[in-house]
Image: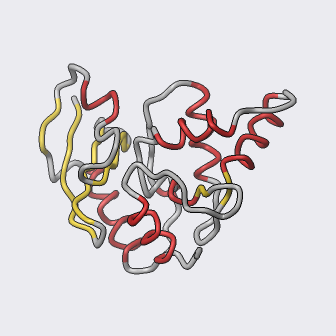
Amino acid sequence: MYYYTKYVSPIGELTLLSDGNALTGLWIREQKYFGSDLMNAKYSIEKNDCDEILKKTKNWLDRYFKGEKPDACELKLNPHGGEFRQEVWKILCEIPYGETISYGEIAKRIADIRGIKSMSAQAVGQAVGRNPIGIIIPCHRVIGKNGNLTGYAGGIDIKKWLLTHEKAI
């Protein structure tokens, strides 16, 4: 059983999804890949504004949008995705508030972790774009190699808003 609720934020309505034990999704309304593979699967999903995970997530978001710097580690997260995506999302959680990293830098870190010569920044970009827990797993902190604001499933304007809010740009 999965539970969802809505959250009204300065960047628009967010949909939060929980499996009752961990947060499994956070999407900006109308974002690319909204609901990812999970929301489109044949899972039982019902609205539940009282789910503890969702309540904790709303509190985290309240603090974030007030300008505090809550850490992703404060919440139990369970993003659904393969091994490579999980590696990328783990690195995203390590990007400090107010800082950015390039797709190429993430690719280099994964290559180092795997003990290989190189990793495709494009493959990293695809994994970043499929992040099912936006904002909390901070995919908005990933930029192009020249500092360009490239690709964001929620839209470049929202990416710019989030980075400006964090004073990263």
Nearest to the observer: residue 3 or residue 109: 109
Q: Quadrant of the C terminus?
A: bottom right
Q: Residue 56, how many percent across, how many down?
A: 33, 58
Nearest to the observer: residue 116 or residue 58: 116
* Residue at 24%, 27% in the rendered image: 40
Q: Is residue 167 above or below residue 77?
A: below
Query: Which residue lies most toward the left here?
Result: 47
Q: Would you say 55 lies left or right of 165 here?
A: left
Q: Is residue 66 above or below residue 84?
A: below
* Residue at 54%, 36% in the rendered image: 127
Where on the picture, by quarter, is residue 41?
top left
Q: Would you say 110 lies left or right of 73 here?
A: right
Q: Residue 145, how many percent across, how many down?
A: 70, 55
Q: What is the image's colouring?
A: secondary structure
* Residue at 67%, 58% in the rendered image: 101
Where on the picture, by quarter, is residue 19?
top left
Q: Is residue 80 above or below residue 34?
A: above
Q: Would you say 86 lies left or right of 60 here?
A: right
Q: Would you say 122 lies left or right of 19 here?
A: right
Nearest to the observer: residue 122 or residue 36: 122
